[in-house]
Every structure is written in C-alpha cells, then in structure tokens.
Image (cartoon, rainbow, N blue to C red):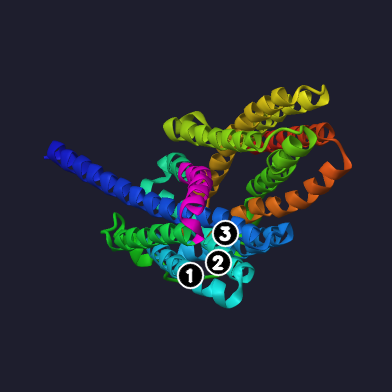
Amino acid sequence: MSIERKRLDAAGADTVRRASTRRFAALLLAQACLLLGSVVLCFAYPLYVLDETGSATAYGLVGAVSFLPYLAATPLGGVLADRADCGRIFSVLGMALAAVTACMPLCRNAFGCVSSTIVLLCTDYAAQAICKPAVQAAIPELLGEDQVERGCAWASQVTMGANILGPFAGAALYGWAGIDGAGAVASLGFAFSAIVGTLFSRAPSCNKERDAKKGQGPDLGLRNAIAFFGAKQTLLLTVLLVALFNLALAGASLGTPVVVSVHLGASAQWVGLIEGTAGAGGLVGGLMVGMSPYRFNAGHMGRYILLSTLGVVPVWISLAIGAPAWAACIAYSLGMFWVMLWANIASIELIGRVQREAARGVRGKALSIVHLLLSCTTPIGQMVYGYAYDMATPAVVMAAMVAAGVLVALLLGMFERKGAGE
C-alpha cells in the first residue's frame, strides 16, 4: 500500500509540475506579445515625430517625458502583483494598450503628433513597468523556490529578445507600412496578450489555497516592503550598490553613439553592431543561468560585477592608445558583449534573491522597489554622461567607469564576506 501511495503521490506531483510549467509558458507568451508590441511603438513613434517635425528637440522631448510614467508606475506594479492575478493584469494592460494604439490616427489629427505620441508612449512605458514585477512575483508560486533562477532567466530572455527584435520590427513596419501599419501590428500583439492573459487567469490553478488568499487581508501599500528592506539591510545595500554599478557603467551603453560617431568618426552601422552585440551578451548570460542555474549564486555578486567591469577595459585601452576606428569599434563590440553577459547574470541573481527572501504578500512590492532603484540610473546616467563626454575624452570617462565598477565590486565582496561570517 505504501509503495502504491508513493507512486500515486509522485504521479500527482508530476501532473502539478507540468500544469505549472504550462501556466508559466502562457505567462511568458503574454509577456512576449505585450513587450514586443511596446518596443515596436517606442521605436517607431519617436521616429515618426522626428520625420513629421524635423526637430531633434521634439524627438528628445518625447523620449524624456514618456519615460517618467515608467518610474511612477513601478510601485503600482508591485502592489498589483501582490493583490491581483497576473493573468488579469495582462488582460487589462493588453486591452488598454490595444485601445489607445487603435485610437492614435484620430488623436494625431485632433491633438497633433507630438502630444498624442507622448500620451501613447506614457501609457506604453507605464504598462511595461506594471507587467515586469507581476511576472517576476508569480515565478516562485508557479515554479517553486528551487526554480526561481531558471524562471527569472527565461523571463529575462523574453525581455531581452523583445528589446532586440522590437527595433528591427519597428523599423521594418514603419518603413513598409507607415506608422499606422506599425500601430496596427502592435495592437494585434496587445490583443493577443490580453487573450492569453484571460485564458491564464481562467485556467485551473495548482495552488487553490494560495489563490483563495490572494488579495485578502490588509494591504499596507509599500510600507511593508520598506519594512522588509529595513530588516534586510545587507540585501538593501546590495541593491543600492548594483544600482550604483548600473549608473557607473551606463556611460558605456548610453555613450555608444557619441563615442562611435563623434569621437571615432565611424559609421552609424557600428552603433547598431555594438548595441546588437550588447543585447546578444545579455541573452547569452540569461541562457547560461537558465541552463545551469545552480552554477551561479547570489552570494557572488561582487565577482559578477567585477567580471562585467572588465569588459570596459579593452574599450578604454583602444581609446587611450588611439587605435584605428575599426579596431576601437571591434573592441567596443566585444567589450559590451562581455559587460552585458555578466551584468544580466548579476541582475537575475539579485532578482532571484529578492523573490526567495520576500514573503508572498511583500514580494511584488519589494521587486518594484528594486526595479525603481535600478531604473533611476537611466535618466541620471543620461544627464551625467552627457556632461562627462562634453568635458573629457572618452578614454578618461571609460577609466572612471572601470574605477567605479571595481570599487563597487570590492564593496559587494566585503558585504558578502560579512554576511557569510554572520
């Protein structure tokens, strides 16, 4: 009898595992459709504004203003991740984005291309900010805590893939079918994401007790997440140091057009190649964690940050010695591949640590705080490095990046040793 019971228990566990895997795959599909449509719009519409107005100021204004709702909506995404079903979140976001995108031809005629584009991209970035913590908060519940890194790696692959394919798709659609054609294809992606999200929310859950408790009880907003980080001061310091690292090395990616086009005098194709290899590095890093999650450990963040920083060294050397433009661009491409490979591994391990240590009702909000801190480095980096490249040579700026990255790696290593000693 005991052997038969064990066999039945094993069969039941296998059935639950397969059902959870199918639900996770559906969640990734909904995320992929929504993000790909979002990136297509984020690429095509600013180009449309530039073509219509001929103003670089309008082009920059659209991008700068539209990113602000991403920062504002990130905490809301964390609250929703803890209070609402992930499938319903995608269903609502997909329908809202599809409706707003479909109305754009009328809005452009009524309000002009600049203001209507700002409204569209604000909605778009806010949706991206909401869906990211929703997906990551659902991973431990769908796959179990022992598969957190693997699930986080696959979610990261979807995001990186959308960020790489989206600009290509946006450029092709905009050039072939115009802005309305690009918007129509993006609307179809949003609608499909909403359909998959609806099916996901209606599918039978593997943990009915958890779903019954979902959304019940008092919601303290972000206060309980702030209290969580107050009790986990080593984790908070790790997040802050990783954010500082992102800021330190932001100039390598944000400064690519400046270094390549202005200082090296190389063609714009090199900019695309460098950005493509950087994206490929992130994909390879996520694939490494997804295939061998137990080879990596969140306790080795200092090591990953140091390895990522070393990717800037060949770029700095090529600029310092005055290498030919083609050689410097090759060094830049290979260096950015290495930087993004280890940076993505560090990001996955950090998110996985937060997912494991945060309780169910706090997880989404804690993840939203992490994303908010990491995302703030983008606008700050744009301001800091825009000034830095005007005031100093790229070689000096790259040397400062290496020094800052090494300092962050040493501090992380010190905190990791202190945590291990405790």
Tag nearer the camera, 1 or 3? 3
Task: Say whether marks 3 and 2 touch (CB < 8 Å).
Answer: yes
154 vs 277, nearest the viewer:
277
Three-letter code for the amino acid on which mark 1 is drawn: Val
| As drawn, 282 above or below 175 | above
Location of the C terminus (image quadrant):
top right
Q: Is residue 153 visible?
A: yes
Q: Is residue 198 magenta?
A: no
- Which circle, 3 or 2, is nearer the viewer? 3
Q: Are marks 1 and 2 in contact (CB under 8 Å)?
A: yes
Chief secondary structure of the magenta portion: helix
Q: Earlier in the sequence, mark 1 or mark 2?
A: 1
Q: Which residue is mark 3?
A: 45
Q: Farthest residue in the left direction?
A: 1
Q: Is residue 222 visible?
A: no
Front residue of 268 and 130: 268
| Region rendered in magenta | 156-179
Asked if residue 138 lies left or right of residue 257, the reply is left
Is 73 left or right of 391, judged from the image as shown?
left
In the rendered image, residue 28, in percent from the top left (x then y), is placed at 39, 49
Residue 166's spot in the image, x, y percent? 50, 48
Name the residue at 63% across, 55% down. Answer: 229
Q: Amino acid at mark 3?
A: Tyr
